[in-house]
Amino acid sequence: MQHESEQTQSPYQTLILSLGALGVVFGDIGTSPMYALAVCFNATSLPVIGPNILGVVSLIFWSLIIVVSIKYMLFITRADNDGEGGIFAIFQLLKSSDRISKTWMLSVLTGIALCAAALLFADGLITPALSIMSALEGLKVSFHNINEWIVLSTLLIIIGLFSIQRFGTSILGGLFGPVMLVWFSVIAALGFNQILKAPQILQAFSPHHALRLIIELGWLQSLELMGCVILAITGAEAIYADMGHFGRKPIKLAWYGVALLALMLNYFGQGAYLLNAHFTSGQNIDPFFDIVPIAWLIPMVVLGTLAGIIASQAIISGIFTITSQAIHLNYLPRLLIKHTSKDLQGQIYIPKLNILLTLCSIALVLGFESSENLASAYGFAVAATMFLTSIAFTFLVYYIWNWSWMVVIFCCFAIPLDFLFLAATVTKIPDGSYVSILISLGVLLIMVSWIIGDRYLMNKAQRIALLTPILSEVVSTRKDLHYQARPAIFFQHLSFPTKFEIAPNALLRQIQLTSIVYQPTVIVEFCCTNTPRVAENDRLRVIDYPNDIHLVSASFGFAELISLDAVEKYGQEKNWWKTQSDIVFYSAHEDLRNGAEQGLPPYIKWPFIWLHSYDQNMARTLNIPALQYVELSMPIDV
């Protein structure tokens, strides 16, 4: 779903997009009140007394203001790439700049993009388990000793949630905004009711309570506490990542008009309840569900579970999207991607990834068994993603916009704060943050292995490669070739730069084996641009050679999925073919073998061989009929 230009949006359209943003963009941060304040006290063993309550609530409030309202809303959302946001969008913007030309700069930016993508994957694995489990744990207020039932129910909901991904999220997506509007309204009302009973909680608006608590605790305990406070802003990274779906204006309206006010009222309401309650030392607290009237508890658990599912669905869809972009940028193998909507190109489903997400989410639920334990593993991925986004944004402001004064302002508050949150989550490594680190490192190793392995294959292929102009001359000089009056498309399946005009290995092997030259012979290569979308007029670049050989470069933005539609239409206009059924398609596929004396290092080789086994052929990627597709195997020692 791509938003219209914000200048042409009517007020009604802006409101509809804002309602959608409530569900997709703020679904994650909107469910944080279920566990964030409770974890701040339970995980740190902080005494539940007046000064501490005011300090913690003040820390949460000012974190929301500084990180979300100022850093993301006022600064980072300005960095849009043709309306798109996210780490890959900002990465492609930087790559397109002439000032980012040094190899080390490109390497640093690539590393930032890959690390941020890996961290988002870890974030997405933990979110479903944490959000759904924390909602169901509200039942503990009225029912005791039901931990096993909560774990079982969480598993069933997670399995059901991932099972429906194959059908698309259009129906569920239509409920996102309205359900989250009800959710924000209810938590705001519950919090406001408690504030009326203890208005002294409003003192937490003053930041001096937060500063006083940090000074009293000292650095070590303060870092431990900040590692819990960050749970209140998890989901803020989705603001920039999902900007392309809704636009900056609707997201700002949804935040300032609904989400921020509701979160503020609820956190202050929980704090007000704690001020009036009396807890013994070491007693676990759950202020979110404690302020819910007993008669409303079951409906609130149901509503909270729905909100948790929505938060989970938003991050699952985000992982599918960023994985698709990584595949298009050649950071991952070509996994099977299915469209789940005829109208919305962005709704996709990746079966193998969905299975992996399901298994990992189940393992996390079984391994941690409670939302409080799982919350310890959650913060690092969020803090690291925010920190890397701030670094990338600083590069953008300095090298693209040349706003030196803005770099100074941004760096003075955003990067130190992000580093503080990151350092705080590092202190929680023994308690569970190691899980998100291991997941991120595993995903990062996968992407790095694929990138290095793909370049290795290109270097191997270059040794036998032939430039298309030279191939055309060779064809002219050979008298033993047979010209077949049938169109054929040969795919350049390796990601060579288009300027090289390298003939595909499939074409070279086909001529070598059969001595047949198809008329016409059409070489098709797919190129990824630095923009999210490419205008249809700029989609194709065609070079014609003698002997009816043609090179067609089809460009696609990093937010688009590749297809043959434009190539087939162009071929019909040139009278190369009448329909797709006239064409025979050729591609090559490497048969990787372990045997090269100076091949890839083992820690790269084995992940790459494993990944390459999942790299689907062009026939499945482009939905080409199997009977019209020929794949030539190429044995390669790695």
Image (tube, rainbow, N blue to C red):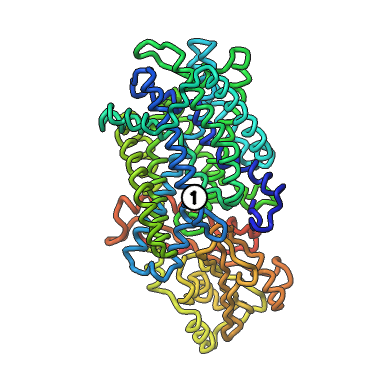
Residue 521 image point, x, y percent:
60, 76
In the image, 321 versus 49, the foreground residue is: 49
Residue 608 visible, this orientation: no
Residue 634 to residue 577: above or below: above
In the image, 149 versus 379, the foreground residue is: 379
In the rendered image, the residue lying farthest to the right is: 578
Tell me if mark 1 has few (under 14), some (14-19) or many (20+) residues whose alpha carbon lies within 10 angstroms of its own: few
Residue that label 1 marks? 74
Residue lying at 31% horizontally and 63% vertically, measured from the top left = 104
What is the quadrant of residue 194 in the picture? top right
Residue lying at 50% horizontally and 83% vertically, measured from the top left = 469
Q: Which quadrant holds the C terminus?
A: bottom left
Residue lying at 56% horizontally and 42% vertically, measured from the top left = 25
Q: Secondary structure at mark 1?
A: helix
Residue 420 to residue 50: above or below: below
Q: Is residue 292 left or right of residue 279?
A: right
Residue 588 image point, x, y percent:
50, 65
Q: Is residue 493 left or right of residue 246?
A: left
The kind of residue on which mark 1 rests is Leu
Residue lying at 49% horizontally and 27% vertically, measured from the top left = 267
Residue 177 image point, x, y percent:
65, 38
Residue 188 image point, x, y percent:
58, 27
Residue 256 visible, this orientation: yes
What is the quadrant of residue 98 in the picture? bottom left
Q: Is residue 512 left or right of residue 18?
A: left
In the image, 73 versus 324, the foreground residue is: 73
